[in-house]
Amino acid sequence: MGLHKPNLIVLLILVLMFVLLIVSFSSSWYKTSIRGPDHLVSYIQYKYDSIQNITKSNATIRIEWNSDQQMPNAKRIFQLSFAFTIVAWVFTVVNITLIGFSLGGYLKKIPPCVPINNIVRFLPIGMLIFTLLSVFTFLGLPRAIDQDCWEHDNFGLLCQPEEQRDRLVGSLNEGNISWGPIEGWFCCLISSALSLAATAVSIISSRYTI
């Protein structure tokens, strides 16, 4: 069938998603920062498996996120969001591969009894579901932090400031203390929007075996 324009549009969106999701699951998702009286800022950045402490002197200390940090529920939020992102990425890879085959005319060789056209058309729904699951799961981080701090007598890296237990994004002391999602989560959020666009174009306009 060759160059069917909606197919190419979906393919381009998926390639962009492919890149964004790699950035998402290889980047930190959350950061707390403290600005001192000398205007130097120290950061703590969180991923699904590790924590980075970037000091005022720009020294970076990386530690594995384990039970010593007393934040099992918060860690579970990071891990679930990461897992959903990985599944969305797998859907993206499969979809890109099948669209590539369709552009080469290979899907037309599949027996008619296999509804390959509909499979490829509706496959972006999987990406949409899992990117949204990842994004919305992460919105539960403040509640998880609150539960961890309550269970462990306010002992844990995320227990201070206490306002982190109420809001995913915030700041205190005229912005000298701040916290919130960073590039990992935002890349997944953008990917969810792109997957919605890919799903709409694919279902409404794309044809993969004609």
Image: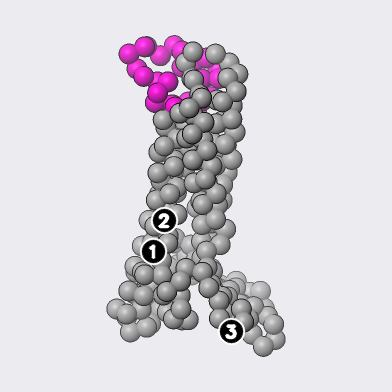
Q: Are marks 1 and 2 in contact (CB under 8 Å)?
A: yes
Give the amino acid type for the residue marked by disc 2 in the picture.
Phe
Q: Residue at the location (42% across, 62% down)? A: 139
Give the amino acid type for the residue marked by disc 3 in the picture.
Asn
* Residue 29 visible in the snapshot: yes
Check disc 3 and report its element: helix, strand or loop: loop
Say which residue label 1 marks: 140
Q: Are marks 2 and 3 in contact (CB under 8 Å)?
A: no
Give the amino acid type for the residue marked by disc 1 in the picture.
Gly
Say which residue label 2 marks: 136
Main SS of residues in magenta? helix
Question: In the rendered structure, which disc, 1 or 3, sits on the residue that comes first in sequence?
Answer: 1
Vertical order, 199 against 33 (above or below): above
| Within-10-Å neighbours for mark 2: few <14, some 14–19, many 20+ | few
State the extent of the magenta-drawn residues as a range.
98-121
Q: CA–CA distance between discs 1 and 2? A: 7 Å
| Within-10-Å neighbours for mark 1: few <14, some 14–19, many 20+ | some
Is residue 156 highlighted in magenta?
Answer: no
- Residue 54 or residue 174, whichever sits in front: 174
Q: Residue at the location (46% across, 71% down)? A: 167
- Residue 192 or residue 36, whichever sits in front: 192
For the image, the number of numbered tags is 3
Q: Which mark is residue 173?
A: 3
Name the quadrant of the N terminus: top right
Question: In the rendered structure, which disc, 2 or 3, sits on the residue that comes first in sequence?
Answer: 2
